[in-house]
Image (cartoon, grey):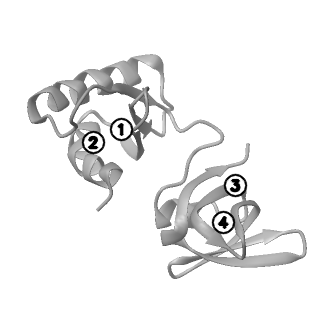
Amino acid sequence: MQRSEQLKVLFEPIVDALGYVLWGVETSLSGKDPVVRIFIDSDKGIGVEACADVSHHVGAMLDVEDPIAGEYRLEVSSPGLDRPLFTLQQFEKYQGHNIKLKLRRPFEDRRKFTGQLAKVDGDELVIREGEYEYILPIQLIEKANLIA
């Protein structure tokens, strides 16, 4: 299980209890500016107060549980219009929308794709770029975002 998935398991009950949906978690813990980024969502939208509330509660849990070694910055935000996509269910929800994605390793000598998310078929995505279609296994995806 990746670090972001481990943290999602810890964060989800807190975010749910506060009345929000945990959209996803990104981590970038190497380098000189380590960060844990939490995306929350709600049918009513997400404001600054919601982000501050989640940050306060998750921060307190992180101080007690200490699942991350060293220093890092905690960020909480809404997914926004160019929302990142993390789960198979999120990809299914946005079929027909344009996305950009980056793969963990090259597929047909490429790591970056931009096009329409034509279909989700099992654990594979069908990405349409012009007249071409690419079938990409979801486990190869490093990062994916809607194009606003």
Q: Nearer the viewer, residue 124 or 32?
A: 32
- Badge 4 or badge 2: first in the primary sequence: 2
Residue at 71%, 67% in the rendered image? 110
Q: CA distance from mark 3 to mark 4?
A: 13 Å
Nearest to N terminus: mark 3 or mark 2: 2
Instruction: Relative to 116, say whether 75 is above or below.
Output: above
**Distance (Cα) linking label 3 and label 1:** 26 Å
Q: Would you call the spot at circle 1 few (<14 residues within 10 Å), some (14-19), or many (20 or more)?
A: many
Left or right side of 29 for 96: right
Q: Which label sits on residue 20? A: 1
Q: Which residue is mark 2?
A: 16
Front residue of 35 and 144: 35
Q: Amino acid at mark 4?
A: Gln
Marking on residue 95:
4
Q: Circle 2 sits in a helix, a strand or a loop, which is it?
A: helix
Q: Nearer the viewer, residue 118 or 4?
A: 4
Which image quarter is the C terminus in? top right
**Residue 73, position in %: x, y?**
36, 24
Q: Quadrant of residue 74?
A: top left
First in sequence, mark 3 or 4: give its number.
4
Q: Amino acid at mark 1?
A: Tyr
- The crowding category of the residue bearing disc 4, from other C-alpha atoms within 10 Å (few below 14, some 14 to 19, many at least 20), is some
Local crowd size for mark 2, using a 10 Å CA cut-off: few (<14), some (14–19), many (≥20): few
Identified by mark 3, the residue type is: Lys
- On screen, residue 115 versus residue 79, left or right, reads right
Q: Are marks 2 and 1 in contact (CB under 8 Å)?
A: yes
Does 42 appear above or below 70?
A: below
- Residue 70 in picture, x, y percent from top left: 24, 29
